[in-house]
Amino acid sequence: MHYLSTRGDATARKFCDILLAGLAPDGGLYLPAHYPQIGTERLGQLRRIYAEQGYAALAFEILSLYIDDIPADDLRAICRKTYTEEVFGTAAITPVRQLEGQLHVEALSNGPTLAFKDMAMQLLGNLFEYELARRGEQLNILGATSGDTGSAAEYAMRGKQGVRVFMTSPHGRMSPFQQAQMFSLQDENIHNLAIEGVFDDCQDIVKAVSNDLAFKAQYKIGTVNSINWARLLAQVVYYFAGYFQATQSNDQQVSFTVPSGNFGNVCAGHVARQMGLPIARLVVATNENDVLDEFFRTGVYQVRGAAATFETSSPSMDISKASNFERFIFDLVGRDGARTQALFAQGVGQEGRFDLSGDPVFADIQARFGFVSGKSTHADRLATIRDSYRRLGQMVDTHTADGIKVAREHVGAEPMIVLETALPIKFAATIEEALGRQPDRPAQFDGIESLPKRVQVLPADVTQVKAYIARHCD
Ligand SMILES: *Cc1c(COP(=O)(O)O)cnc(C)c1O
């Protein structure tokens, strides 16, 4: 399998070439040259493998279609080491449960940081360690987080050979639980940098460091953001696992609803559907930051700046420029790299907008690609959390609640699977507002807020962040 860029650079690259890279040199995102097709017979084999050997074996089968520069035995070992009951809490790894009628929830949030990002990040940690050892190289990951991504990255990379993490976060602005999760890590290779500023300041610092090419090369700076193809690929696996759990035979269809921000999670569903997994519809659920809902309803993609982005009670979806969206648009316009370049580098880049409403590719977006959408507000979220708990006896987090609200508007004859993207304890204040009680806390997190914290507070100043990195790299 080779990888190409959404903006037309077709230089043949292998999986491990793009594993440690960010954007393609032309500014595009990497995608496989084609999507391997899973016919009915092969789907039957995968169903048996999943039933008999479990999630890690299924992951190996899917991943090996896209990775041919890691020996099969090594890749199998990496999958086995990643997807264990010990790390993900259940032998099923991503168990599907019924909410009511055709409505189901697939649990993706029982990993170490209680959000679905662990599903991909845990694999990435093991792939990075493997590839860096093979090359005899080191990598220093620099990131910015408002909560979920940073903790998932730290728990995935802690104690790994050849990797250090420098994670910036806005000082005092994450929830006490999120701060405790990150700052209680005592591993030598994990560095928490609490920046005196807001999330955008953290992002600006990361950008400024990455744009200093000499510094970046000298200190081997890398990232683990959501455009990384390996993260997306890891997420494809649980669409198959969800399908097998919600159906008995391979002539059945299912639909998925995905609480969305950067479009990474639902883009993995798009890949699974392109491979031939019988997915009727992919429902994109947004919160008040509804840039994606607007596109799927109208054909107009209008990104918004930080000032026009609302702070909501489903904060991991407070995104007004979806970094993975370009991958889908590339497929939508028939994999035309020049056209994608024109839409994103010129359209979004300059005016922050493009309009496909009059284009034939938009007219059949639902028929060809299965995409529909909807949005949910704070009031919807509270009502859904209450209803799920009081009437159905299930406590769900705020992002998953957005998914359930929108899924109900699209339930058809086939099972509808909502992806559970976090557990309620991560967003306790809103649960308390909805239910008048604290969410349940998994036993391993008892007393986490009183553990010793390992964090360096720094001003929002690139020079000081660079100096900190330099001091802590050998
Ligand atoms: C990251 C995240 C999302 C959004 O996922 P994308 O892949 O960015 O669309 C939704 N919910 C939670 C809890 C998250 O952490």
Image: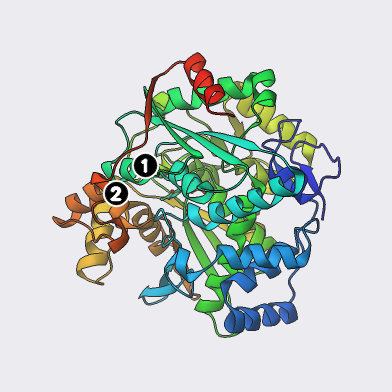
Secondary element under disc 1, as helix, strand or loop, is helix
Q: Which amino acid type corresponds to the residue marked 1 in the rendered image?
A: Pro
State the image coordinates of residue 259 (x, y, percent, origin top left): 44, 53
User: Can you say which quadrant of the picture contains the N terminus?
Assistant: bottom right
At x 57%, y 48%, the residue is 160
Q: Is residue 429 left or right of residue 105?
A: left
Which of the 4 image quarters holds residue 99?
bottom left
How far across and down, in percent of the image, does residue 238 sit? 56, 65
| Looking at the image, residue 94 lies above or below residue 262 | below
The type of residue carrying mark 2 is Phe
In the image, which is nearer the foreground, mark 2 or mark 1? 2
The residue beneath circle 2 is 427
Asked if ligand 1 lies within 8 A of label 1, the reply is no
Residue ID for mark 1: 315
Is 438 drawn above or below residue 167 in the view shown? below
Q: Quadrant of residue 351?
A: top right
